[in-house]
């Protein structure tokens, strides 16, 4: 006879527990980790997690389970459960004190106890996600934290998105372990959890663990623990064969065999057998409970069953004693989901409809039985399951509003889609929900956009416009066109600006609020005409102010100010950014506040005001942390902080900013920009392998989408610089030519001038094409002017040459006059960079000025320039530049500072070896070099061996790289 329904002894799993223990041990030392635990239904995942939690020691273990609701899970259910548990343990104020920024309005989307949520929109969801991760990280400062998310196979998309965010963006040095369990046997080919598991499996700190079935020996141990005696080998053979090592089935089979009855023939019968031994009224109550889901609140079950607390408790007590139900807080859960599923599947069609109707009616009577927004969403589920189309439509409409409050945009999209599906089946649908079909289409399109379903948003707006009489309802037409324009912009679809122009033209005068929003959106996306952008933004700002829409007013003012600055008239317009932030702060429009910091720091850096750009960006990073947006807006601002720090030569400080931002695991485009800046610094310091690694990481992001010039053009420069550093001149020229073919440099002067400067150093046929671009490329501000002067010095062009389109400055003079003009051109560029306080660019142009001075015969002038450049290079740690400067000094026999003038050949090479090295650097073979120098191939081979030995390198390619790095032949 069975003594225990569940084995008191935890059997097997030693290796699996060891893996989790090891992950927790790593987390204790500050190595955050995630473990994905899979296993078939009944294999013991919940028991396994419970055993692990019991061994976790001082770690705080937070457990939340996904709840099945029809074909989808309840939005954010496990995280709501975790938050509720924290509030019980620490109190509302205790939790609030741990939330980054000290405001809990983001968490109010999950728990009403935290007050009213902040504004809607994509930033609301980002804020919720960041606040929750920040809360976990703060908890982990005191002791290790284990977050367990159970039954992820039931997770809705919002829950999956939040889970992915937590796993991907957890800081690597936080004492946090995330454990996720799921049914592996339910993951069919199209199951939505499959791609998430595959995606997370590629993250470095994520491990996967599969719980296997028990071996026969382990089943014997389990059976002995349950029965407190050993079974015969024959009985064990039968139990093991029937259960196939699944612990749940072993328990059920032992329960039935202990009752002295024949074993059921099917799994369903086996699971229901433990229910059928219970009293009839308990069985009936369990069938009712099965329609409520895996977990059901006591009060809701009481209302549906029509029993008072005492009667309900008496009826359920046998089910709890028989281990069919377990008490779970203020409600009950089936011991295993398979039992509930078997009960629910056993309902007759009429019973199924009646039970779901009873649940719906109970919730209609008192929705507060369940916490918001769960009540509205479960109500919609029950009316839909009851096949009552009218109330299914009405409740789905209400549930969509509740889901929006939680920023559960995927659930909101699903509910609104259900309203659209049922619309034609409910004749008075518009009267029932208080709006028409076109407005539902529009709202669904808005939410589809927020949920990332861009193509569906385009289709829905198109359907709405096709159904609409534009002349009769221009307001709705304008809203639909604005939404299609926004979505089209995100998809890089042509025509999105046309949609916005059309929307602006349709908004009537009696809708100033909408007109302001449409105009603000249009202004932000206009890039062809600056005056139109400014005037459109100004009008949007004025209307926004009149109607009291602070968010729109602030965004429009930011757009107008940014467009007015244009890098050459910065000081007169900067006040606009401060005013925009003040307006945004009055309405707690966090997105606008941070966008203001982003735009202002961008303008200041583009104008060469590096110190002020860094300060604005630094303040913005701190604001983003306070608002709970450190990983999104905060890391974008970190890019805007690292850039001016690099310009100022504060490279180590810039790298610290980049390192901190990367630890937050920012969105891929932001990460690519940060890695790009780090690659520039590594390359300037001669760490070519590191630079190439960072470059490859950023390229992997940029190859997966369409990006603006601010990403693409700096990346093109890095590619060329890296190829040059490796001595691969021909490939560098090919890469440059490809960029010139594929990119419209005239559209982005700020990012095009650095391209011209970088590519001008390549020489060759590309020079003519660069000159044709430079003739027409605009110049705005001191920074772009410094780049232009540098390009002119490199290309040997005068102002007259550039304005007339002359092929080369060499044609305008000769001899000493020409040499003097070249020195002056370089010195003018040096002065421009010195005024901007950009030491690396100053040192680079000083090198060019020194070379020009040597060519003009001014060795003293060259010495002064080289000494200053060498000083700057040493301060920066720019080793390759320092080596080039030393090479120039040796070749020119110039003493730098107090050093004696070098009187030997460069690098200790003979004149003939220098000739050979020049051809090696050009990629010539020994036979080709022999032909050029009229010597034997064997003699060339000897020279090459001597060159390798003197340079301390192992190959011809490395020798060529040294020659290119120090620009040994640049002036020849």
Image (spheres, rainbow, N blue to C red):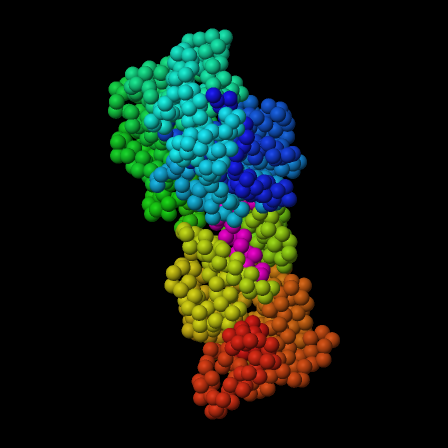
Q: Image quadrant of residue 291?
A: top left
- For image coordinates 55% across by 65% down, the residue present is 688
Judged left or right of residue 966, residue 268 is: left
Residue 568 in sight here: no
- For image coordinates 52% across by 38% down, the residue present is 13
Q: In this picture, is 927 found above or below 141?
A: below
- For image coordinates 62% across by 57% down, the residue present is 651
Q: Which residues are magenta?
A: 664-682
Q: Nearer the viewer, residue 595 or 330?
A: 330
Residue 869 in sight here: yes
Position in image of residue 381 (x %, y %) = 37, 23
Judged left or right of residue 467, residue 519 is: right
In magenta stretch: residue 671: yes
Q: Nearer the viewer, residue 84 or 649?
A: 84
The overriding secondary structure of the stretch rendered in magenta is helix
Q: In this picture, is 180 found above or below 839?
A: above
Position in image of residue 922 (x %, y %) = 48, 78
Position in image of residue 679 (x %, y %) = 55, 59
Q: In this picture, is 317 found above or below 245?
A: above
- For image coordinates 48% across by 63% down, the residue present is 719
């Amino acid at each position: 006879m069975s003594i225990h329904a569940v084995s008191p002894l935890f059997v097997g799993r030693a290796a699996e527990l060891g893996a989790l223990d090891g992950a927790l041990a790593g987390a204790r030392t500050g190595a955050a980790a995630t473990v994905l635990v899979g296993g078939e239904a009944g294999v013991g995942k919940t028991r396994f997690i419970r055993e692990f939690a019991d061994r976790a020691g001082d770690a705080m273990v937070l457990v939340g389970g996904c709840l099945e609701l029809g074909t989808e899970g309840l939005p954010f259910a496990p995280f709501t459960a975790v938050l509720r548990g924290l509030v019980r343990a620490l109190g509302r104020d205790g939790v609030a004190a741990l939330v980054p920024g000290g405001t809990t309005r983001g968490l109010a989307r999950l728990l009403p106890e935290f007050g009213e949520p902040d504004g809607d929109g994509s930033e609301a969801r980002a804020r919720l996600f960041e606040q929750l991760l920040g809360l976990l990280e703060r908890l982990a400062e005191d002791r290790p934290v284990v977050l367990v998310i159970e039954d992820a196979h039931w997770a809705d998309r919002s829950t999956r998105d939040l889970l992915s965010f937590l796993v991907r963006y957890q800081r690597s040095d936080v004492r946090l372990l995330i454990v996720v369990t799921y049914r592996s046997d339910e993951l069919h080919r199209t199951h939505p959890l499959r791609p998430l598991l595959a995606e997370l499996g590629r993250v470095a700190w994520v491990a996967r663990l599969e719980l296997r079935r028990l071996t026969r020996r382990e089943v014997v141990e389990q059976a002995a623990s349950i029965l407190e005696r050993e079974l015969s080998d024959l009985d064990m053979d039968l139990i093991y064969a029937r259960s196939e090592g699944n612990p749940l089935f072993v328990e059920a089979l032992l329960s039935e065999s202990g009752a002295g009855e024949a074993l059921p023939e099917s799994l369903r019968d086996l699971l229901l057998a433990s229910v059928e031994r219970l009293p009839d009224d308990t069985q009936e109550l369990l069938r009712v409970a099965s329609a409520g889901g895996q977990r059901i609140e006591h009060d809701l079950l009481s209302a549906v069953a029509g029993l008072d607390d005492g009667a309900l408790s008496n009826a359920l007590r046998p089910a709890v004693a028989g281990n069919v139900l377990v008490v779970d807080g203020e409600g009950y859960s089936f011991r295993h989901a398979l039992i509930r599923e078997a009960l629910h599947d056993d309902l007759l069609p009429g019973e199924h409809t009646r039970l779901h109707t009873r649940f719906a009616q109970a919730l209609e009577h008192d929705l507060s039985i369940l916490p918001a927004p769960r009540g509205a969403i479960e109500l919609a589920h029950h009316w839909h399951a009851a096949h009552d189309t009218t109330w299914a439509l009405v409740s789905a409409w209400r549930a969509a509003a509740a889901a929006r409050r939680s920023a559960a945009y995927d659930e909101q999209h699903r509910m609104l889609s259900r309203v659209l599906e049922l619309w034609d089946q409910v004749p008075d649908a518009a009267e029932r929900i208080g709006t028409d079909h076109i407005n539902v289409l529009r709202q669904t399109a808005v939410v589809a956009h927020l949920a990332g379903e861009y193509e569906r948003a385009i289709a829905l707006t198109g359907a709405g416009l096709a159904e609409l009489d534009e002349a009769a309802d221009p307001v709705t037409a304008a809203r639909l066109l604005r939404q299609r324009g926004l979505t089209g912009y995100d998809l890089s679809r042509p025509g999105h600006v046309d949609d916005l122009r059309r929307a602006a033209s349709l908004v009537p005068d009696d809708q100033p609020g909408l007109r302001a929003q449409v105009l603000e959106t249009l202004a932000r996306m206009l890039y062809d005409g600056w005056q139109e952008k400014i005037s459109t933004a100004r009008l949007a700002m004025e209307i926004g102010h009149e109607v009291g829409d602070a968010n729109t007013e602030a965004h429009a003012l930011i757009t107008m100010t940014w467009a007015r600055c244009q890098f050459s008239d910065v000081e007169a317009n900067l006040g606009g950014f401060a005013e925009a932030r003040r307006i945004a702060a009055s309405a707690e429009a966090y997105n606008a506040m941070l966008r203001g910091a982003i735009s202002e720091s961008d303008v200041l850096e583009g104008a060469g005001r590096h110190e002020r750009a860094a300060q604005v960006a630094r303040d913005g990073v701190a604001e983003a942390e306070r608002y709970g947006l450190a990983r999104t807006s905060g890391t974008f601002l970190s890019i805007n902080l690292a850039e001016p720090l690099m310009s100022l030569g504060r490279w180590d400080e810039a790298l610290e900013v980049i390192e901190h931002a990367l630890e937050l695991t920012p969105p891929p485009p932001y990460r690519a920009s940060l890695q790009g800046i780090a690659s520039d610094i590594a390359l300037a310091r001669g760490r070519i392998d590191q630079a190439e690694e960072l470059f490859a990481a950023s390229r992997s992001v940029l190859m997966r989408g369409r990006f603006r010039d601010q990403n693409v053009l700096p990346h093109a420069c890095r590619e060329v610089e890296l190829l040059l550093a490796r001595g691969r001149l021909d490939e560098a020229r090919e890469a440059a030519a490809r960029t010139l073919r594929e990119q419209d440099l005239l559209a982005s002067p700020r990012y095009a001038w650095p391209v011209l400067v970088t590519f001008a150093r390549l020489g060759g046929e590309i020079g003519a094409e660069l000159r044709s671009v430079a003739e027409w490329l605009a110049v705005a501000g001191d920074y772009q002017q410094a780049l232009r002067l540098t390009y002119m010095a490199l290309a040997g062009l005068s102002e007259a040459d550039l304005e007339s389109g002359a092929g080369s400055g060499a044609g305008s003079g000769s001899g000493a006059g020409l040499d003097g003009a070249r020195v002056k051109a370089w010195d003018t560029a040096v002065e421009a960079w010195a005024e901007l306080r950009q030491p690396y660019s100053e040192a680079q142009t000083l090198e060019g000025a020194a070379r020009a001075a040597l060519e003009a015969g001014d060795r003293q002038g060259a010495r002064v320039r080289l000494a200053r450049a060498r000083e700057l290079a040493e301060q920066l740690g720019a080793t390759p530049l320092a080596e080039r400067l030393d090479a120039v000094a040796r070749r020119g026999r110039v003493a730098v500072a107090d050093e004696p003038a070098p009187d030997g050949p460069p690098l200790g090479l003979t004149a003939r070896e220098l000739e050979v090295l020049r051809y090696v650097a050009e990629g010539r073979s020994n036979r080709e070099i022999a032909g050029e120098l009229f010597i034997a191939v064997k003699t060339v081979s000897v020279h090459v061996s001597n060159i390798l030995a003197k340079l301390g390198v192992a190959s011809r390619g490395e020798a060529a790289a040294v020659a290119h790095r120090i620009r040994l032949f640049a002036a020849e």
